[in-house]
Amino acid sequence: MHDNENISEMFTRFTTIINSLKNLGKSYPNQELVRKILRCLSKSWTPKVTAIDEAKDLTTLPLEQLLGSLMTHETTMKNHEREEAKKKKTVALRALKEENESDEDGDM
């Protein structure tokens, strides 16, 4: 999976490949598809992959449930990144305001 690609795009691409292979007579059991998806995720997904691997029975985990879990995690991570960016911006603005206030004090 490319870093700027989201889970939905990756899954669409994966499904297209799997369906093309199926049309050529090659099919994979659900368990193998789940493992292939988990293996193709970037290193930033390692904690989530480990959690899924430990918490779920990959032999019976439906591909759709895996997709839902990954999309939920992706949304949570994006929300967390936005919150972190807001916090950094607020701290930077506060520091800039304090710096400007102390400059004004020095002028007197």
Image (spheres, helix red, strand yellow):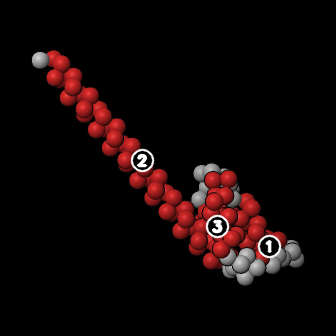
Residue at x 55%, y 62% (from the top left corner)? 74
Residue at x 83%, y 76% (from the top left corner)? 27
Q: Earlier in the sequence, mark 2 or mark 1?
A: 1
Residue at x 26%, y 28% (from the top left corner)? 99
Measure the alpha-carbon separation of dots 2 and 1: 38 Å
Quarter of the rendering occupied by the C terminus: top left
Secondary structure of residue under mark 2: helix
Viewer can see residue 16: no
Mark 2 surroundings within 10 Å by alpha-carbon count, few (fewer than 14), some (14 through 19), many (20 or more): few
Amino acid at the residue labelled 2: Ala
Residue 85: mark in rendering: 2
Q: Residue 33: where, in percent of width, then height?
A: 76, 72
Q: Is residue 48 above or below residue 56?
A: above
Residue in the foreground of this view, choosing between 67 and 93? 93
Q: Residue 40: where, in percent of width, then height?
A: 73, 59
Viewer can see residue 57: yes
Measure the alpha-carbon separation of dots 3 and 2: 26 Å
Amino acid at the residue labelled 1: Glu
Residue sitting farthest toward the front? 54
- Residue under numbered circle 3: 51
Secondary structure of residue under mark 3: helix
Instruction: Say which quarter of the image contains residue 30.
Output: bottom right
Instruction: Say which quarter of the image contains residue 14.
Output: bottom right
Q: Residue 81: where, in percent of width, then height?
A: 47, 52
- Residue under numbered circle 1: 32
Residue sitting farthest toward the top? 107
Q: Residue 63: where, in percent of width, then height?
A: 68, 76
Q: Are marks 3 and 2 in contact (CB under 8 Å)?
A: no
Residue 24: mark in rendering: none
Residue in the foreground of this view, choosing between 34 and 99? 99
Q: Earlier in the sequence, mark 1 or mark 3?
A: 1
